């Protein structure tokens, strides 16, 4: 199983980006997915989580109302729509696949079985 994150780039404050995370390979069972980010000198932190069916999601407080996580299971792709970007959103963003059958949002990194390589988001002020 491999996750390929893309869509990062340089954007001005207030701008928008859409990140994608494409999964290749086979995963058995339903799986939730999440996005994390890591800024220089900081620990990797939770950003958003989405259930297998896409009807439940969870966000860290700092991105609520600005970011939207979604998924297309037919395309095996998870998205993170980011709007009203701020300089403090700048980081490397990672997508991850949760353990099969997870029902409740998982904010801790432990339990995610697969991780993408990360995509850089830079926000200029």
Image (cartoon, helix red, strand yellow):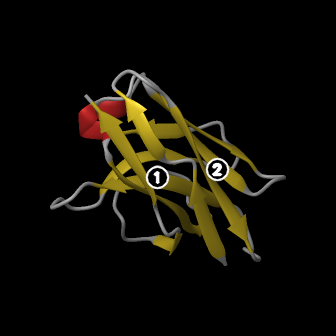
From the viewer's perspective, tell me whether residue 13 is left or right of residue 50.
left
- Residue at 64% from the left image edge and 50% from the top image edge: 78
Residue 122 horizontal/vertical position (percent): 35, 44
Q: Can residue 60 be seen? A: no
Of residues 117 and 100, the one drawn nearer to the viewer in this rendering: 117
Of residues 53 and 81, the one drawn nearer to the viewer in this rendering: 81
Question: Could you say whether the residue bearing mark 1 is in a helix, strand or loop?
Answer: strand
From the viewer's perspective, tell me whether residue 2 is left or right of residue 122.
right
Q: Are marks 1 and 2 in contact (CB under 8 Å)?
A: yes
Q: Report which quarter residue 58 is drawn in.
A: top left
The residue singled out by tag 1 in the image is 35
Q: In the figure, 56 relative to 77: above or below?
A: above
Q: Quadrant of the N terminus?
A: bottom right
Question: Could you say whether the residue bearing mark 2 is in a helix, strand or loop?
Answer: strand
Residue 100 horizontal/vertical position (percent): 62, 68
Q: Residues within 10 Å of mark 1 (few under 14, many from 20)?
A: many
Of residues 54 and 68, the one drawn nearer to the viewer in this rendering: 68
From the viewer's perspective, tell me whether residue 22 is left or right of residue 34.
right
Return the mark for residue 85: none
Q: Residues within 10 Å of mark 2 (few under 14, many from 20)?
A: many
Return the mark for residue 78: 2
User: Reading the chain from its start, which is encountered first: label 1 or label 2?
Assistant: 1
Q: Quadrant of the C terminus?
A: top left
In three-dimensional space, the C-alpha distance between marks 1 and 2, rounded to whole angstroms, equals 9 Å
Q: Can residue 41 be seen? A: yes
Q: In the figure, 56 relative to 93: above or below?
A: above
- Residue at 40% from the left image edge and 47% from the top image edge: 121
Residue 69 horizontal/vertical position (percent): 56, 39
Of residues 12 and 58, the one drawn nearer to the viewer in this rendering: 12
- Residue at 42% from the left image edge and 22% from the top image edge: 65
């Amino acid at each position: 199983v491999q996750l390929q994150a893309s869509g990062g780039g340089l954007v001005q404050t207030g701008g928008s980006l859409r990140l994608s995370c494409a999964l290749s390979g086979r995963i058995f069972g339903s799986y939730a997915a999440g996005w994390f980010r890591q800024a220089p000198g900081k620990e990797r932190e939770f950003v958003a989580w989405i259930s297998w069916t896409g009807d439940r999601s969870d966000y860290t407080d700092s991105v609520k109302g600005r970011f939207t996580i979604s998924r297309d299971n037919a395309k095996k792709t998870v998205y993170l729509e980011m709007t009203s970007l701020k300089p403090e959103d700048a980081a490397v963003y990672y997508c991850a696949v949760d353990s099969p059958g997870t029902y409740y949002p998982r904010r801790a990194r432990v339990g995610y079985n697969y991780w993408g390589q990360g995509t850089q988001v830079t926000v200029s002020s």
